[in-house]
Image: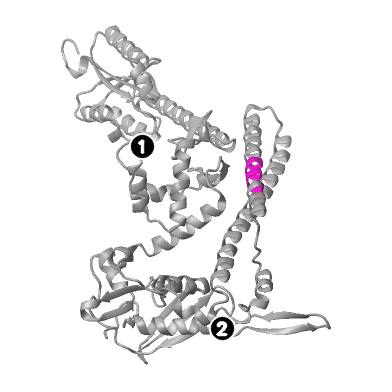
């Protein structure tokens, strides 16, 4: 600033550009300053420059612009009587912010100068013109943002990356995801370890000890970054982009790193692990036969286990009150029996394990569904098809082809919308073609979803077939299994166990939900020819209940 600083003969020059890159280049800011200084000389005024640098239209709040905020404070204090900006949009394209400045300029008697002239906002004509120019600037800003949004969606439809760093295992080439082989092998290793039952802590140790750097290159891997990676659908060959304004979702195909079966298996493992995460630290040193299958029938929480050898205590219980203390810092009735979720008394572990084991093995022994002569028929009737490796590979190839078709069709849709904006196609042609493309996209997406479900079903059927091979013919020798084998055996038959406490009888009722309807099933002969008999399985139900009578958790 040169000379006197009196408000009446000082021109305050506010400069801003939309991006930091423009600010670093300096040309726009320099041009604005030079024009402002030129106006000050024409008026015979001194000048003061308020340089905001690079601030985009996303920073519309006055508080988000330090220089504009300081200028506003000076204006309210009566220290500014003459203000110069390059054009209306330098102050703001937002009508609310512009209105604040119009009001304050009018109140303080400030004359506003731009490259196109000057405005005395105490004059009705100049005030109206200023409002009109502000409205035009805001409309221009909205239009530009909408064009940018639509352009981004068209690029995404054609398979282009939507912005930000690509996931670990990928890099960008021509704005599209391509696999980085060196990182991809570690992605495969991570998913393989999870499917095998490995913990995220072990995976972190493997990655760090092998010098594998996370994508952000700062520090070591964290449990959070590993869990986030495991949720990433990109690795199975697709991801969902959601437009923040319209809420419209676009499924985008990309190169896969792992097959769908591995992806499904990892998600199943993750779900069960997350569900039981709160119990791990406290109970990992003890074995529980049923805990991972049990849920409180009152509040739905996973049942916890407690083994305290020094007090001869061994019990299953609902951790509802414990979680209240963790989540809320206390409980409305912390130590009152009968309050809370309703699971008011713990169950004795040995007694409960014994009752459930005897029930499940008894159901197995009696079940016609599980007898050798009808096993294959039951698998077929329940829609469980045992696929060969060749069939699985063919299904995976089909999914990859559908993903490519989906990507091409999305690219066609993006080109059509771009041509519509350019006026290269008529409204009628656009409407007809749009319907056809969306119908084709819908068909591809439906076939993709069915193929993925089919592949997921193949994974589940393999688990069941493996169970049949390992345990199906060993009913008489099940008691000699190890604890871990018994746990695996029960998990192959039982989907979940819901437990309710009946306060009147002071007993627990356990409801077992089975994977197949083997409770009270049967078999009947439907054809008795001279050479062969044909059997038909009479399905039972998939639930059965038992009562665990009162017994103290201790002793």
Question: What residue do we see at 44% from left, 43% from top?
Answer: 186
Q: What label does residue 203 carry, if any? A: none
The answer to whether residue 3 is above or below residue 310 is above
Expressed as whole percent of the image width and height from the top left, the position of residue 47 reads 23, 14
Image quarter in which the N terminus is found: top left
Kindly state the secondary structure of the residue where label 2 is placed: helix
Determine if residue 34 is in view: yes
Expressed as whole percent of the image width and height from the top left, the position of residue 232 reads 47, 47
Expressed as whole percent of the image width and height from the top left, the position of residue 523 reads 68, 83
Towards the viewer: 255 or 248: 255
Towards the viewer: 537 or 136: 537
Crowding near pointer 2: few (<14 within 10 Å), some, many (20+)? some
Residue 401 magenta-highlighted: yes
Towards the viewer: 206 or 28: 206
Kindly state the secondary structure of the residue where label 1 is placed: loop
Image quarter in which the C terminus is found: bottom left
Expressed as whole percent of the image width and height from the top left, the position of residue 428 reads 73, 36
Question: What residue do we see at 60% from left, 64% from top?
Answer: 461
Whole-angstrom CA distance, mark 1 to mark 2, is 56 Å
Q: Quadrant of residue 376?
A: bottom right
Which is closer to the viewer, label 1 or label 2?
Answer: 2
Which residue extends farthest bottom? Answer: 505
The answer to whether residue 58 is above or below residue 538 is above
Of the numbered discs 1 and 2, the one sitting upstream in the chain is 1
Q: Which residue is mark 2?
A: 365
Span of residues in magenta? 398-406
Q: What label does residue 216 carry, if any? A: 1
The answer to whether residue 409 is above or below residue 174 is below
Crowding near pointer 1: few (<14 within 10 Å), some, many (20+)? few
In the image: residue 203, left or right of residue 253: left
């Amino acid at each position: 600033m040169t000379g006197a600083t009196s408000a009446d003969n000082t021109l305050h020059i506010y400069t801003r550009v939309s991006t930091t890159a423009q600010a670093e280049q300096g040309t726009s800011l320099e041009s604005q300053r030079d024009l402002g200084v030129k106006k000050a000389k024409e008026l015979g005024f001194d000048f003061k420059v308020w340089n905001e640098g690079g601030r985009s239209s996303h920073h519309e709040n006055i508080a988000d612009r330090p220089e504009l905020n300081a200028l506003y404070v000076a204006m309210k204090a009566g220290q500014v009587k003459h203000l110069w900006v390059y054009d209306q949009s330098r102050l703001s394209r937002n009508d609310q912010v512009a209105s604040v400045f119009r009001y304050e300029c009018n109140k303080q008697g400030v004359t506003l100068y731009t490259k196109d002239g000057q405005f005395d906002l105490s004059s009705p004509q100049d005030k109206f013109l200023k409002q009109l120019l502000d409205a035009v600037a805001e409309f221009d800003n909205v239009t530009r943002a909408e064009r940018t949004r639509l352009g981004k969606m068209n690029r995404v439809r054609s398979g282009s990356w939507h912005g930000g760093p690509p996931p670990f295992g990928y890099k960008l080439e021509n704005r599209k995801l391509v696999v980085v082989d060196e990182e991809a092998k570690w992605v495969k290793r991570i998913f393989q370890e999870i499917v095998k039952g490995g913990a995220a802590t072990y995976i972190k140790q493997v990655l760090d000890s092998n010098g594998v750097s996370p994508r952000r290159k700062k520090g070591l891997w964290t449990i959070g970054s590993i869990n986030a990676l495991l949720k990433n659908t990109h690795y199975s060959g697709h991801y969902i982009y959601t437009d923040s304004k319209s809420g419209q979702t676009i499924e985008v195909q990309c190169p896969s790193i792992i097959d769908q079966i591995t992806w499904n298996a990892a998600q199943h493992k993750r779900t069960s692990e997350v569900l039981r995460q709160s119990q791990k630290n406290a109970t990992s040193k003890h074995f529980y036969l049923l805990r991972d299958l049990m849920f409180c029938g009152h509040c739905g929480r996973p049942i916890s286990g407690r083994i305290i050898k020094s007090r001869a205590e061994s019990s299953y219980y609902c951790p509802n009150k414990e979680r209240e203390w963790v989540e809320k810092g206390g409980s409305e009735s912390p130590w009152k029996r009968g309050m809370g979720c309703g699971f008011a008394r713990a169950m004795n572990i040995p007694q409960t394990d014994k009752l459930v084991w005897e029930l499940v093995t008894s159901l197995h022994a009696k079940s016609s569904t599980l007898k050798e002569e009808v096993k294959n028929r039951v698998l077929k009737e329940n829609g469980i098809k045992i696929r060969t490796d060749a069939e699985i590979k063919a299904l995976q190839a089909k999914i990859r082809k559908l993903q490519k078709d989906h990507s091409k069709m999305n690219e066609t849709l993006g080109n059509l919308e771009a041509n519509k904006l350019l006026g290269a196609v008529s409204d009628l042609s656009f409407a007809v073609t749009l319907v056809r493309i969306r119908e084709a996209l819908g068909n591809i997406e439906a076939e993709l979803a069915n193929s993925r479900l089919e592949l997921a079903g193949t994974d589940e059927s393999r688990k069941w077939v493996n169970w049949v091979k390992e345990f199906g013919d060993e009913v008489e020798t099940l008691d000699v299994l190890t604890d871990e084998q018994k746990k695996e055996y029960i998990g192959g038959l039982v989907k979940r166990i819901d437990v309710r406490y009946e306060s009147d009888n002071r007993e627990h009722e356990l409801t077992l939900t089975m994977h197949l309807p083997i409770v009270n099933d049967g078999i009947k002969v439907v054809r008795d020819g001279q050479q062969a008999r044909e059997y038909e399985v009479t399905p039972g139900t998939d639930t059965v209940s038992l009562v665990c009578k009162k017994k103290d958790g201790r002793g």
